[in-house]
Image (tube, helix red, strand yellow):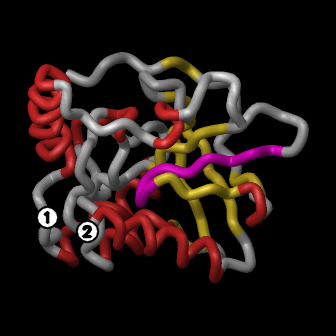
Amino acid sequence: LAPPRAARAEGKERVDVPKAIVHVDDGDTVRLDWPGKKSEEIRILGIDTPEVLHLDHDLPYPQPFGDQATGFLQGCIAAATKIELLRSGTVDKYGRTLGYIFVNGQNYSPLVIAARLAYGPNPRFGDNGLPAELKACTEAAAKAGPPPFEPPWQYRRRMREVTKHMKAQGIYPKGPREDEPKDAK
């Protein structure tokens, strides 16, 4: 059973997003640096893309196709003349906004599914109050068939064990920020 998610006050209208404030983390996560406001991390709904190297998330190795999925999102953002965010009414357990990204009026999630760089929606997470968007993802997944990589949730589970072993052996790599003194910028 999925953990409960916090309610969110925002509505369910698409919000214009200036391209300059979008920073791609991986194929299903972006950060929006709103001017004069706190950054907002968006977990894109309807998809699960392969993982990239994230030492701080116990992912010491990138998953096959993770860089390609990230590149796909970066390309969609770079080519877009209009970017919109459709927020759901919830945030996830990490405090990320759950929502859909639209590029030039198209829902990004079915696009990346059709490219076979994402698994479609997990029914256990529900529609987050956005049934039409979830339906488009489900239909795209049925049409595309399974992607050529293991489900990212399985990969994350395996990497937790790898990370635990590496840390116990003292061989877990340090990221560039971990090597810098705390006051270095």
Dot 2 alpha-carbon crowd within 10 angstroms: few under 14, some 14 to 19, many 20 or more: many
Circle 1 residue: 149
- Whether residue 23 sits left or right of residue 16 in the image: it is left
In magenta stretch: residue 29 = yes
- Whether residue 174 sits left or right of residue 37 in the image: it is left
Q: Is residue 167 above or below residue 68?
A: above
Badge 2 marks a residue whose secondary structure is: loop
Q: Position of residue 11 (x, y in %)?
A: 69, 37
Q: Position of residue 170 (x, y in %)?
A: 19, 25
Please give the count of numbered marks on the rendered protein: 2
- Whether residue 35 sits left or right of residue 2 in the image: it is right
Badge 1 marks a residue whose secondary structure is: loop
Residue at horizontal 23 percent and vertical 43 percent from the top: 123
Residue at horizontal 14 percent and vertical 73 percent from the top: 145
Q: Position of residue 65 (x, y in %)?
A: 25, 68
The magenta-colored residue range is: 26-34
Amino acid type of the residue tagged 2 in the rendering: Phe
Amino acid type of the residue tagged 1 in the rendering: Phe
Toward the bottom, the furthest residue is 79
Q: Position of residue 8 (x, y in %)?
A: 61, 24
Q: Which mark is residue 65?
A: 2
Q: Which residue is nearer to you in this view: 105 or 150?
A: 150
Residue at horizontal 15 percent and vertical 53 percent from the top: 151
In magenta stretch: residue 122 = no
Dot 1 alpha-carbon crowd within 10 angstroms: few under 14, some 14 to 19, many 20 or more: some
Q: Which mark is residue 104?
A: none
Quadrant of the image for the N terminus?
top left
Check if mark 2's residue and mark 1's residue have beta carbons within 8 Å. Answer: yes
